[in-house]
Amino acid sequence: MRRDHKIIKIIQKLQREEGIFLNLQQDKNKCSPKTILNALSSLGRPIRKDDEVRLFRRANALAHIFYQKNFEDLASNEEIMRALIEEEGCATDEIMAMNSREAIRKLYRALDSWPVILSVDNASHWIYARAARSSSVFPVVCITDSQRTIKNLIRTATIDLSEKELLKRWRDKRGWFDSKHKIRGHYYGIVVKKIR
């Protein structure tokens, strides 16, 4: 683990020298605020240095109001994420799907206009999808992963994933329960819509 931190610092130093400034999370449990900021940035909202700290404090306050727990202690935090996005002046919509075909169809439809925040790795991490495009062989989805890892630093946190790779990370084995429609979906995402 110490070796990884040393490698990360060396890569960051080299990238700073080349003028590459990545918007990666500082701590393990802060992917939600960082992903929200990345999505807002893609909609043209300027991001200040203190925005991540401000969003994390607000998320903690909302977690105490809704659940009487710290934000990091919550098993799932999509309601708080939606509230934070709406406080930032954007509208939200949900993508919930039972199967992979429906999930990809809904994702592509949303990506035509807006960025989508996806719950991946069995609801333990959030990433945001920016665009869907067709490569010469198969369609790919361009995502940004804010997790501070050596792999993300090397590829500057932006990845093109095939549908198969994305669905493998996106599928939640346990599933999400939609109380409005009384169904359990295995794919969940938040569409971030800019209000004009």
Image: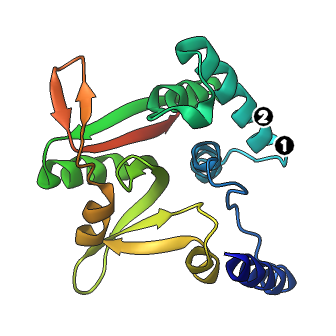
Q: Say which of 36 and 74 sits in front.
A: 74
The answer to whether residue 180 is above or below residue 72 is: above
Q: Residue at x 86, y 85 (%)?
A: 17
Report the Cα–Cα distance between label 2 and label 1. 6 Å
Question: Which residue, given by chain and number where applicable, does mark 1 sit on?
Answer: 50
Visible residue check, residue 40 = yes
* Residue pictured at 56% horizontal, 79% vertical: 151
Residue 5 shown left or right of residue 105 in the figure? right
- Quarter-of-image position of residue 161: bottom left
Pointer 2 with pointer 1, Cβ within 8 A:
yes
Mark 1: amino acid: Asp
Percent across and percent down for residue 181 are 17, 20
Residue 76 versus residue 147 in the image, above or below: above
Q: Quadrant of the N terminus?
A: bottom right
Closer to the camera in the image, 65 or 109: 65
Locate residue 136: give its quadrant. bottom left
Instruction: Tell me the element at label 2.
Output: helix
- In the rendered image, the quadrant that contains the C terminus is top right
Q: Which mark is residue 180?
A: none
Is 62 in front, or is 15? 62
Secondary structure of the residue carrying numbered label 1: loop
- Total labels: the figure holds 2
Counting other residues with Cα less than 10 Å from the Cα at mark 1, is it few (<14), some (14-19), or many (20 or more)?
A: few
Q: Residue at x 38, y 31 (%)?
A: 93
Q: Nearer the viewer, residue 137 or 94?
A: 94
List the residue tagged with mark 2: 54
**Mark 2 is on which residue type?**
Arg
Q: Position of residue 135 (x, y in %)?
A: 30, 81
84 left or right, relative to 130: right
